[in-house]
Amino acid sequence: MSENRVIGLGDHLPWHLPDEWKHFKKVTDGKPFLMGRKSYEAPDALHSLYRNVIVTSKAPDIKENSTEYAKDISDALALLSDEKEVFVLGGASIFSQMLPLVQRLYLTIVHAQVEGDAYFPVVDQNDWELVSSEYHGTDDAHAFSFSMNLYIRKEPE
Ligand SMILES: NC(=O)c1ccc[n+]([C@@H]2O[C@H](COP(=O)([O-])OP(=O)(O)OC[C@H]3O[C@@H](n4cnc5c(N)ncnc54)[C@H](OP(=O)(O)O)[C@@H]3O)[C@@H](O)[C@H]2O)c1
């Protein structure tokens, strides 16, 4: 997300950051994905080669190769209950429903104020411990600098 929490503009990512994309692919490689129908259908969507669970109210009664459909979040979680780790890929509606449930946030902050129409939910810093952060500056291929952060949910006191 950008500094002003933007994650999308008209079904696209509002930036082109090849090294962040590489990082994203490396972190999520081989993992199951949970995502909303709009993000799954977006032209720049990354799909899991292993397993994609798509949340939609119009779930077709089919299972295509690595893609399954769930009628809501609890249905998706039931389908994924045998998995040790699931990556929540968005978009905005799925991030806000899943944020209270996740244990880790792989959250890249793009250091810019960006125009958009989809937002990441507010992250309460009291709930999260920053355990690693890798900064990437601007260059010919990256118009914005960004920090690839990993947060782990704090244990309740
Ligand atoms: N920066 C990032 O990391 C990132 C990642 C992903 C997406 N994005 C951006 O996010 C934007 C898309 O976000 P979005 O919120 O509009 O769409 P979304 O979350 O990808 O998908 C929304 C759709 O998911 C289904 N859905 C969500 N919750 C549901 C529930 N509880 N029960 C049943 N179905 C449910 C509905 O599908 P039906 O309409 O089929 O019922 C809904 O229309 C785009 O701009 C995209 O580029 C950014």
Image: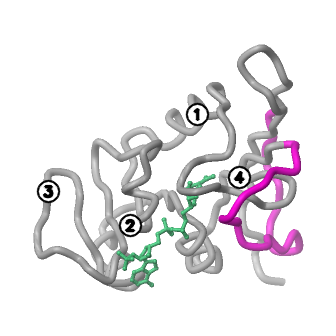
The reply to whether dot 3 and dot 4 touch (C-beta < 8 Å) is no
Q: Is residue 72 left or right of residue 10?
A: left
Position of residue 104 measured from the top left corner of the image (x, y, whole percent): 64, 61
Q: How many marks?
A: 4
Q: What SS does tag 2 mark?
A: helix
Q: Amino acid at mark 2?
A: Arg
Numbered disc in front, either 1 or 2: 2
Q: Amino acid at mark 4?
A: Leu
Q: What SS does tag 3 mark?
A: loop
| Mark 2 vs ligand 1: CB below 8 Å | yes
Q: Is residue 9 left or right of residue 121?
A: left
Q: Residue at x 65, y 33 (%)?
A: 16
The reply to whether the magenta stretch includes residue 126 is yes
Numbered disc in front, either 3 or 2: 2
- Disc 3/disc 4 C-alpha distance (Å): 30 Å
Say which mark, if any, is on residue 107. 4
Q: Which colour style is shown?
A: one colour
Q: Residues within 10 Å of mark 3 (few under 14, many from 20)?
A: few
Q: Amino acid at mark 3?
A: Glu
Q: Amino acid at mark 1?
A: Trp
Considering only vertical position in the picture, is 136 above or below 61? above
The reply to whether dot 4 and dot 1 touch (C-beta < 8 Å) is no
Residue assigned mark 1: 21
Position of residue 76 measured from the top left corner of the image (x, y, whole percent): 35, 76
The residue segment tinted magenta is 111-134
Q: Residue at x 54, y 40 (%)?
A: 27
Q: Earlier in the sequence, mark 2 or mark 4?
A: 2
Numbered disc in front, either 4 or 1: 1
Position of residue 144 measured from the top left corner of the image (x, y, whole percent): 82, 33
